[in-house]
Image: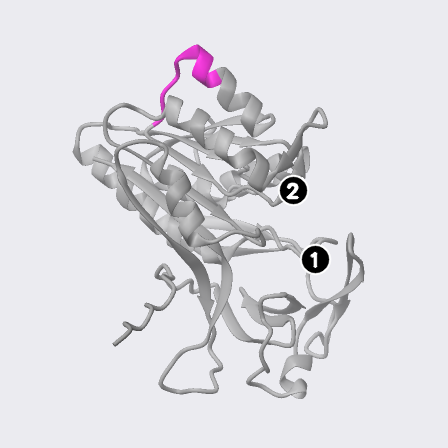
Amino acid sequence: MTAEAPHPGVYRHPPLAAYELIDSGHGEKLERVGEIVLRRPDPQAMWRPTLGEDDWQQCHWRFERESDRGGRWARGRAANTAPPEAWVIEHGAARFEIRPTPFKHIGLFPEQSANWEWTAERVAALKTAGDERPALLNLFAYTGAATVMASLAGAFVTHVDASKPALRWARRNAELSDLAPDAVRWIEDDARAFVAREARRGRRYRGILLDPPPYGRGPKGEKWEFEQHVPELLELCGQILDDGPAFLILSCYAVGTTPLAFETLLEDIGDGHVTAGELALPQTASPNPERSRRLPAGLCGRWMRG
């Protein structure tokens, strides 16, 4: 008798009071971010929506794609008055500014709450082991949600991103969250170039967070392609991880690989415990009351030693 294959591993999604995936389907998702309801594209939502079109129309903002490079936001039926172009949500002691962009993003990836929680657990363990302020490196750090959460957990974070606007947004989130001016080391640089220099300098980190895009450009036009460049970057990261207890998280959305590939990649870092799977967002509306529907939100792998 052939054994049934196990279901794909999905990391637990800690609930966020300020975020709710209401429904998904037909290539879109309907979500509440704070008090604002958004409707925007998501190619992973290939199934039929649970709710009817009239429910979907009751949003404040809906994203209308104009080309493969972006689109625009239009007001939905729920917007009796002009909805805000930016607003702030709370998650524990953290504060994040939400702002719909022409690229459909809003400045926050709520599925990453799974990694925020795991990072906080690792930081707490390192502090218990005697490292009062573990040094963490956040690469491709975007608007800094992971940086803020790790800092609030007690880490000193080096935040690296190649985009000036993203760095300004991240600093804004740090200020909103009342982080001290010296709580974070802010770096505008290409991730690979920065890590290579850190390796030459002999710097070490207790933890490294990576959430790279499938494609991208550095501040000097450096080209980034996930499948081509992530093995080299992980090898460099292995050189700057502390020889004692340490950890690394790799996640990515819309990349053509598998959790098994992530697992094998992370095993090359060295002796340590590796897991890999998917990040996913559970939705409120579900066609099956016995099973919550989950929207895939990217791949993730975790490596830990000690």
Foreground residue, 301 or 148? 301
Percent position of residue 99, x then y: 65, 54
The three-letter code of the residue at mark 2 reads Tyr
Taking the view exactly as shown, the residue that stands out farthest to the left is 129
Query: Can residue 29 be seen by looking at this rendering?
Result: yes
Taking the view exactly as shown, the residue that stands out farthest to the top is 201
Foreground residue, 253 or 97? 253
| Quarter of the image with the N terminus in it | bottom left
10 Å neighbourhood of mark 2: few (<14), some, or many (≥20)? few
10 Å neighbourhood of mark 1: few (<14), some, or many (≥20)? few
Q: Please name the residue shown 77% across and 67% down the image.
A: 74
Q: 176 left or right of 305?
A: right
| Quarter of the image with the C terminus in it | top left
Q: Please name the residue shown 49% across and 34% down the image.
A: 231
Q: Please name the residue shown 78% across and 56% down the image.
A: 68
Q: Is residue 99 above or below residue 294?
A: above
Percent position of residue 23, x then y: 55, 77
Whether residue 199 is in magenta: the answer is yes
Q: CA distance from mark 1 to mark 2?
A: 27 Å
Q: Is residue 1 above or below residue 247?
A: below
Q: 59 left or right of 181?
A: right
User: Which image quadrant for residue 79?
Assistant: bottom right
User: Which image quadrant for residue 156?
Assistant: top left
- Magenta-colored span: 198-205
Check disc 2 and report the residue beneath it.
215
Query: Can residue 35 be seen by looking at this rendering?
Result: no
Check disc 1 and report the residue beneath it.
85
Label at residue 218? none
Percent position of residue 150, x then y: 38, 40
Whether residue 225 is in magenta: the answer is no
